[in-house]
Amino acid sequence: MSTPNGLPQHSRVCLTRSMEGGAVQDLQAKKAGKAAKKEAGGDGAPPKISTPISETLKLLPEELKANMKIKSITPRPPRKPRLERAASLDEKSWRKWRRFRTSQESLTDPNETSSSNGSLQEASPSPPSRGRASPCTPCCQQDSLHSSPDALEAGPGGKSRGGASDLGKRASEISSAFGGLLRGKGSAGGKPRLSQIMPARPLPPMELNVASLSLRTANRIDADCLDYRHYSQPKFGRVSSSLSDSRLQGNGSLYDNCSTDSMKSTFSVLTPIRAKDVRSRSYLEGSLLASGALMGAEELSRYFPNRNMGIFVATWNMQGQKELPANLDDFLLPTDPDFAQDMYVIGVQEGCPDRREWEIRLQETLGPHYVLLHSAAHGVLYMSVFIRRDLIWFCSEVEYATVTTRIVSQIKTKGALGISFTFFGTSFLFITSHFTSGDSKVNERKLDYNKTIQALTLPKNVPDTNPYRSSASDVTTRFDEVFWFGDFNFRLNKDRETVDSILNQNPDTDVSKLLVYDQLTSEMSRGSIFKGFQEADIHFRPSYKFDIGKDSYDTTSKQRTPSYTDRVVFRSRYKDDIQAVKYSSCPVIKTSDHRPVFALFRVKVRPGRDNIPLAAGLFDRDLYLIGIRRRATRELLKRREQKDQRSSSICSIS
């Protein structure tokens, strides 16, 4: 059998190979005879011939094949599970042909097994796709067409049962088929293209992955965290990431979605840092607005987008009691604000004998989210500064100083203790004081104040953020934000009976009438004390003096007048930098004759420079571990008690 001159070389080889094998040709001849007998028994009408392209090539003259005009057709998939234009075949013959095709594939060359799937593609035509194929695809298609049931309709001599009119149809089919192949070859740069029909068994997709299968499996996101991307974006407000898909694509890097998602899940809260940024940035030196500065605007905006932080400031005269409250949650974590604060500063006057135990109790209450930045003491004056552990890196070295206001300096019950540091570019000063007591000793208390602002030697090594607005005679002018709190011992200039009547008339803590007699309010309005300071509005009852363990004021023979001795005042270099959010007392703590007083503030923070002495993450590690261990032990004991209570409960039937 002669092969058409227009076929490629690999097509001629494939056609020749398909005609080899006597067993296969005999089987084709038998099936052709059966098909001819079936058509002869019809009603005499010309049968509907659907001769494949490979058989038509045998019948066409050489001149027609050479001068054939190529046209393109768009094949359509069959609507029923049978070959198009083969209406005479039923379901049974179709299954026989499939079994025959399977046996024929097993006899083909093992090197061409990947192209044998083309039989199904030619039998079930579909629109062409842009996928790549191997160069032997055309000859494999010819092989599959030659082995289809329609090819058996031709006689042994290679002549078709159709007339001259059928010859033109066959020629158009040949031209359209090879025209599509030629156009596909030209558009793909010399490589033919396959149709979009999936093979009988889907082949594994070819991927270019930088991560192995085991690595991608290990980095796979858990099912509980599948919505993390949707949750984190509105929360943290991150516009872009240095590890985004678009940047990986734009750089021409090999990547896959799994490995990219794993990197995003690792760095989605802490912003990813590019290698070139790490090379260029310096953690010890930097300018105010430099990109990558540790204390600069970029880091500040990442942690505080509004540049406002929350600060909790509290004061409590413990009266030297050894017994500590069983629970400090109501004191440090009031339920009124929904969120905890970024910084907690607690000042104590007449503190308990065991200062370390007090600090452990504070750490236990605040939990693992906070660390003790610094603590200091001056006699029985204690101050502890806790900060969120995320923010420990943005603090400078912490400095402190003390002042004794008593004539006999060995008795350190009265005086002041100051702690200062810089957070980002904002300097803070916290002072706790215990002024002279006595109803009529207002002048002595003013002297205590004046001595404190003159003798408190701060700052020491940390530079002043604005030295042009500082004064050598007033320590409070050398810092951006100043909080002064403690037992100032200012009283109400009214007798006990009048104060009690006012308190009884206003059970809803309307204390505006009491503040008219307040000594501190009067002195601050005159400017004789706490110059430039402010105080939030008071809406709580006097914090002094109570009977220990009770809610009643002093019932002893002295009958001291209830007063607002425990106060929190503040000042700022810049207007409206400090906003008071809450100012109240904690009436549930009754271990002292004073009630704790606390205030919540919203403070504006500015970017700073890296060329200051940094704390570099320094905190009290031992205290942190002890407090967390106690917190876990307390929780375990609580659960055990609840379990024992449930197991020992008795159900009574009435």
Image: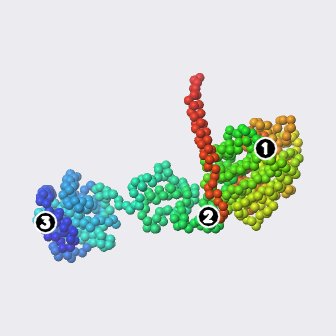
Give the residue type that dot 2 points to.
Answer: Leu
Disc number lying in front (1 or 3)? 1
CA–CA distance between discs 3 and 2? 91 Å
Picture quadrant of residue 355: top right
User: Dots 1 and 2: beta carbons under 8 Å?
Assistant: no
| Percent position of residue 368, x then y | 60, 47
Disc number lying in front (1 or 2)? 2
Q: Quadrant of the N terminus?
A: bottom left
| Residue lying at 66% horizontally and 63% vertically, measured from the top left | 612
Give the residue type that dot 1 points to.
Answer: Ser
Whichever of callouts 3 and 2 sits on the residue coming sooner in the sequence is 3
Q: Is residue 604 visible?
A: no
Whether 230 is drawn above or below 439: the answer is: below
**Which label was assigned to residue 158?**
3
Disc number lying in front (3 or 2)? 2
| Residue lying at 74% horizontally and 62% vertically, measured from the top left | 574
CA–CA distance between discs 1 and 3? 115 Å
Given residues 599 and 321, the one toward you in this image is: 321
| Percent position of residue 20, x then y | 14, 62
Given residues 113 and 45, the one toward you in this image is: 113
| Residue lying at 59% horizontally and 33% vertically, measured from the top left | 641
User: In this figure, which residue is indicated by the disc labeled 1?
Assistant: 543
Given residues 31 and 265, the one toward you in this image is: 265
User: Dots 3 and 2: beta carbons under 8 Å?
Assistant: no
**Which label was assigned to residue 284?**
2
Local secondary structure at mark 2: loop
